Amino acid sequence: MTFHAPHSHSELKLSIFDSVNLLNQNHWNSIVPKNEVYLTMQYLKALESTLADRINFRYILFYDEMYNPVGVAIVQLLRFTDNDLNTEDLHDRFGHFVSDKFIHNLDARVLLCGNAFSTGENGFIFKDSVSNEMAKRNLSRALNRIKRDEKKANDGVSIILLKDFWEESFADMETLEHDGFIHFEIDVNMVIKMKPNWDTFDDYLSDLVTKFRTKVKGIYKKSNDLVMKSLSPDEIEEHQDKIDQLYGDVLERADYRFGKLKAETFKMFAETMPDDFRLAGYFLNDELVGFSTCFKGNKVVDANFVGIDYRYNHEYAIYQRMLCDFIQYTIDCGLQELRLGRTAEEIKSTLGAEPQHMKLYVKHKNHITNKLVKPIVGLIKPSKFEIRKPFKAVLYQD
């Protein structure tokens, strides 16, 4: 742990820890609401205890002049190489702007403020008494401090990355931009807002136009032989090897692989956060052929990870059935929103999901290189897809 005093009255005091077990839990919990699941002690302990062999973690507590805790932030230090990229997709996006030599020599240590394993603003939180400008300035100061500490103690940091911000936060980032951060839009998060009249899945179906209602019924017909079951910690352990295999098969098809969880982490989530976390297994003739995970928090179901046996995916509509089950689960829990994440945007759109724009903020360690990175970052655009309108017209008149 390191402690850094402020240099002016506008700066907060901050303490930096390299293990969640060193934190003052009372101070941390006084800042983080229980429904912010990705910043809770249980969640952070599960990540650190199962992934510390691959990721370095840092935790920041911010204090006011009276040494009262007023904010927290989390940092993950990860190594990002060409093995984590779909190089074909990179060429499609950047063309001649990024050389093969650059791609194949890519080896960057990334200081990530946020969470490699969740989408959304899960990197920091401050009390309302701290202004947005003060929060961002002190957050940037803390990240720069960690970068300097890493340069002395380890092999340094190439990139500072803040992920990922919802559209309503875009106007609050001037302080980060003044400190040299460059923003770019990433692929959208596909979100379904639950309607007040959806007490059951049948209510959801009745709000779909005939064409799309028929498609959903077709998904259930194709997947009729699948048995879905919420797995206990012991059952996750029993199927651990298959879960890791199915998850790995999905990652192999991803455009990039920024951090990788494992069944051991899922088991710990299920043990320590049983009310917030669910891993659903999909069985065909008693064989696990797929799984999905999600968290509940802040009136939202956040769909996270899936694993799929692609030998059976088309015939039994495994992935599409998972999406439908997420909708039913959100309705059954009486929550207001389902976040289905990135990828497969058009499929999710046919079920009623709408795109929510998101941004990342990035800064290279070298000031000159940071200026050179800016035009390349400007080329990054979200994937294009056709947005469907599956609901009856009256639902789009809000």
Image (tube, rainbow, N blue to C red):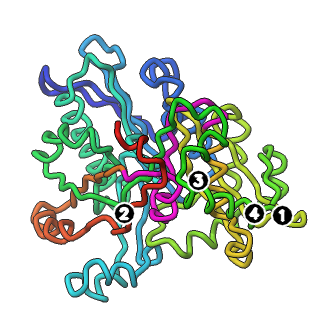
Q: Secondary structure at mark 2?
A: strand
Amino acid type at mark 1: Asp
What separation in Å lies between label 2 and label 1 (alpha carbons)?
45 Å
**Mark 2 touches mark 1? (CB < 8 Å):** no
Q: Secondary structure at mark 1?
A: loop
On the image, the x and y values in percent for residue 127 come to 33, 20
Q: Which residue corresponds to mark 2? A: 109
On the image, the x and y values in percent for residue 298 come to 50, 30
Badge 2, how many Cα within 10 Å: few under 14, some, many 20+?
some
First in sequence, mark 2 or 1: give its number: 2
Q: Which residue corresponds to mark 1? A: 225
Q: Secondary structure at mark 3?
A: helix
Amino acid type at mark 3: Leu
On the image, the x and y values in percent for residue 53 come to 58, 57
Badge 1, how many Cα within 10 Å: few under 14, some, many 20+?
few
What separation in Å lies between label 1 and label 3 (alpha carbons)?
35 Å
Q: Which residue corresponds to mark 3? A: 51
Q: Which residue corresponds to mark 4? A: 221
Q: Residue at x 73, y 75 (%)?
A: 315
Amino acid type at mark 4: Lys
Q: Nearer the viewer, mark 1 or mark 3?
A: 1
Question: Is residue 340 on the magenta stretch?
Answer: yes
First in sequence, mark 2 or 3: give its number: 3
